[in-house]
């Protein structure tokens, strides 16, 4: 069975390395590569790959939000989250967004190929190195914390604030008015319970929206 792939990772060397490794496997073809979340969504809408490999900490639009939007623009595309962080909260966020698989970046090439073939066949895949932790978290009753009720647009604004953009720059990036951007910023501060941008940045790092 032929499988077309989209690779979304912020580092060029990772994108090129994954392409080289995966295209040596029979039946796997990389049809698109993206360096940020917005490019990943656009590529998915255009190419409609069978499987998208999406780094969770992408610039401009987080990998978690990119997965959510890829599922909207290309319902047949099955997503695998790639992450350097593999705590229960990170896994939960990826799965809730619509990922069918989760693979840490320290996984072997054979493990990633196994994940691709699993999700291509409609099966969920969690890397063995994290599956035990997830089961332990659920069975121990510790639970997996989530974010407060933040909308999709507010997540975008939060990420751009954390990346150092000013309110006018955020407005231009998202195609909204400065007043609307200011409103989103104020609403975020209210929901998160902070008064300064530094608090928003700390929250974004803690929740995995951006990398520290």
Image (cartoon, rainbow, N blue to C red):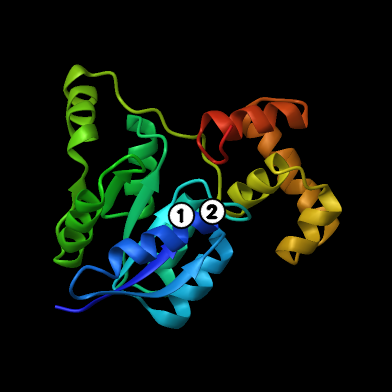
Using the image as rendered, state which of residue 20 and residue 121 is in the foreground: 20
Label 1 belongs to which residue?
14
Q: Position of residue 122 (x, y in %)?
A: 16, 64
Residue density around tag 1, few if under 14, some if 14–19, many if 20 or more, within 10 Å: few
131 left or right, relative to 48: left
Q: Residue at x 20, y 17 (%)?
A: 140
Mark 1 lies on a secondary structure that is: helix
Mark 2 lies on a secondary structure that is: loop
In the image, residue 78 sits, relative to residue 11, either above or below, namely below
Residue 68: in sight, yes or no? no
Q: Residue at x 40, y 28 (%)?
A: 145
Quarter of the image that includes the C terminus: top right
Give residue 205's mark: none
Q: Are marks 1 and 2 in contact (CB under 8 Å)?
A: yes
Q: Position of residue 135 (x, y in %)?
A: 17, 29
In the picture, residue 26 is in which quadrant?
Answer: bottom left
Q: Residue at x 85, y 54 (%)?
A: 168
Q: Position of residue 150 (x, y in %)?
A: 55, 43
3D distance between C-alphas at marks 1 and 2 = 5 Å
Using the image as rendered, state which of residue 83 and residue 134 is in the foreground: 83
Label 2 belongs to which residue?
11
Residue density around tag 2, few if under 14, some if 14–19, many if 20 or more, within 10 Å: some
């Amino acid at each position: 069975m032929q499988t077309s792939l989209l690779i979304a990772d912020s580092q060029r060397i990772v994108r090129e390395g994954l392409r080289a490794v995966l295209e040596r496997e029979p039946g796997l073809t990389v049809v698109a590569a993206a360096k940020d979340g917005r490019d990943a969504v656009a590529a998915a809408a255009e190419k409609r790959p069978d499987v998208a490999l999406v780094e969770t900490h992408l610039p401009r639009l987080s990998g978690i939000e990119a997965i959510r939007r890829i599922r909207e623009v290309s319902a047949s595309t099955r997503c695998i989250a790639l992450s350097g962080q593999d705590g229960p909260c990170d896994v939960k966020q990826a799965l809730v967004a619509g990922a069918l698989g989760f693979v840490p970046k320290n996984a072997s090439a054979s493990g990633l190929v196994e994940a691709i073939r699993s999700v291509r066949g409609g099966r969920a895949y969690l890397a063995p190195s994290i599956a035990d932790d997830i089961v332990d978290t659920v069975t121990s009753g510790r639970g997996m914390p989530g974010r407060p009720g933040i909308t999709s647009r507010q997540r975008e604004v939060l990420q751009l604030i954390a990346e150092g953009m000013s309110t006018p720059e955020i407005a231009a990036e998202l195609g909204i008015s400065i007043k609307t951007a200011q409103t989103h910023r104020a609403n975020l501060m209210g929901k998160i319970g902070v008064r300064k941008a530094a608090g928003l940045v700390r929250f974004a790092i803690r929740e995995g929206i951006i990398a520290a």
